[in-house]
Amino acid sequence: MEKIQNYINGKLVEPTSKTYLDNVNPAEGKVYSQIPDSDKVDVELAVTAAREAFSEWSSASIHFRTEVLNRIADLIDRDKDILAMAESVDNGKPVKLAQHVDIPRASANMRFYATAIQHFASESHQPDDQFINYTSRKAVGVAGCISPWNLPLYLFTWKIAPALAAGNTVVAKPSEITPMTAFLFSKLCVEAGLPAGVLNIVHGLGGKAGQAIIEHKDIPLISFTGGTETGKRIAATAAPMFKKLSLELGGKNPNIIFADCDFDSAVKTSVQSSFANQGQICLCGSRIFVERAIYDRFVKEFISRVDRLTVGDPSVEDVKVGAVVSEQHMNKVLNYIELAKDEGGKILTGGNQIKVKGRCENGFFIKPTVITNLSYNCRTNQEEIFGPVVTIMPFNKEEEVIEYANSTAYGLSATLWTENLKRAHRVSDKLKSGIIWVNCWLVRDLRTPFGGMKQSGVGREGGWEALRFFTEAKNVCINVK
Ligand code: TXE
């Protein structure tokens, strides 16, 4: 059985404790590899390597850093099918989704920041002809990057790329639930000639290896994506240490459909935004609000399309919905379906685990589920479920749906369907979400600020925001007279 290794100081090494955790293939419900159960000793080795590599990497030319990051992107492209299959086996997502989204976007992350750093300017200000201010933005030091299991390599590189491009060195920990592509990625970094110690990957549990990264005194900045509860714990550790924090957390995103929408486009895209990646994307639209005039027609067409989604073996070409990421997560999602029933919800389709024949008979599959007849402020409509489960309800007036949409503790993204331009701007302006899509979903431009409001996060990733996060600004004012 394959044993994943840590990547420390340019070498693939076993955990100092020599202890490992089981890594489960969620589509088969079977252990298929082992991951290092790393601890603070391993983190210390990683931080030492990163600290020692910092001076050379941060003072290397931008051109050199661009070259190395682009070489890594080239190798991701070369090995895209291997990486996609590994992502699918580790996470349970359809291999086609990994091939078309996860892996290409991991490569795009590396390429984007490899060149963005070449255009990342700082400022100068001259209040009069006596003083000149210039702002220098330089790498901070050893960055701690912690990523989740839903888009493993995509979100892993989303943090590492800007951190490295800006000249930091990194100690990264992928989720212990989906470690495989980070391990394969570390091999590509060795092949690309990334200098030793610039990137260090420590595998293991959040509360052990992850916590050791968060609390390490020589890691001054932390970039985290994961659950809101974990984000709270990380902030509690990091804040008294005055660490710079970027927290990309959960969401409970509204998908608002007005009667004047492009109906076919709205219903087709709503199936995607509800169930892509088994609903395990923080940007999924898990609360659907439909204007009453088209509610019955929309529900009928939406359910008919949802029922046609093939759920099954993620390695099979036309499967749209694979396994959810773990047995524990499957049970969490199934418990929420039971809660919905207790709260008066009516299951329009799905609502149960399904047994898939063949090699996946022991896998963790949930039928895409649509629930109605719930109040907008019940727990099912307020808490992040993060699975193939959406609620749907009608609304009458614009003000009413804006209140519903803004009613949760989250504020990550929202989707809006209307052909009325004024309404698009008016409603977008009132929605408390960091990212809003109008008549589309998951269109990503890496230059745009990415992140949520309220309990969906702190700070912004993406574009210049990420490079600003991973650099420290210093302003120098010179008297030239
Ligand atoms: O994420 P966790 P989980 C939501 C979703 C999901 C919930 C929990 O609702 O059900 O979060 O998911 C590491 N110090 N999202 O439990 O625990 C952990 O090892 C340092 C939304 O999988 O937040 C992993 O690498 N690190 C989210 C990473 O944090 C710690 C995507 C995420 O794990 C740690 C994923 C600690 N104390 C889940 N505890 C999104 N916004 O996309 C854990 N970790």
Image (spheres, grey):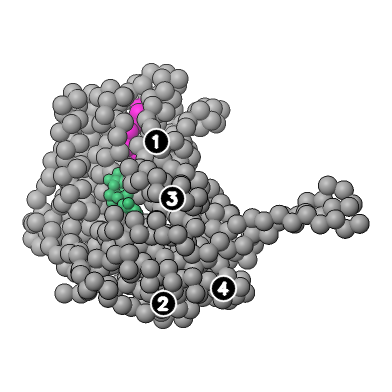
The residue carrying mark 4 is 55
Task: Give how far apart the Cα atoms at labels 1 and 3 are.
Answer: 22 Å
Q: Determine the image quadrant of residue 455.
A: top left
Vertical order, 172 against 133 (above or below): below
Type of secondary structure dominating the magenta stretch: strand
The residue carrying mark 1 is 410
Task: Give how far apart the Cα atoms at labels 2 and 1 are.
Answer: 39 Å
Report crowding for label 4: few under 14, some 14 to 19, many 20 or more residues within 10 A (C-alpha): some
Instruction: Tell which tag, 1 or 4, sits nearer the viewer.
Output: 4
Image location (x, y in percent) of residue 409: 38, 32
Q: Is mark 2 on a helix, strand or loop?
A: loop
Which quadrant does the N terminus fall into?
A: bottom left
**N-terminal label among 1 and 4:** 4
Task: Give how far apart the Cα atoms at labels 2 and 4 are.
Answer: 14 Å
Image location (x, y in percent) of residue 353: 12, 45
Residue range in magenta is 285-290
The residue carrying mark 3 is 238
Task: Give how far apart the Cα atoms at labels 1 and 4 are.
Answer: 40 Å
Vertical order, 36 against 268 (above or below): below
Whether tag 1 and tag 4 are in contact, CB under 8 A, the answer is no
**N-terminal label among 3 and 2:** 2
The residue carrying mark 2 is 9
Report crowding for label 1: few under 14, some 14 to 19, many 20 or more residues within 10 A (C-alpha): many
**N-terminal label among 4 and 3:** 4
Residue type beneath disc 4: Ser
Task: Give how far apart the Cα atoms at labels 4 and 3 are.
Answer: 24 Å
Reply yes or no: does residue 289 show up in magenta: yes
Residue type beneath disc 1: Tyr
Query: Residue at 56% across / 61% down in the picture?
Result: 140
**N-terminal label among 2 and 4:** 2
- Of all residues, the one furthest to the right in this rendering is 481
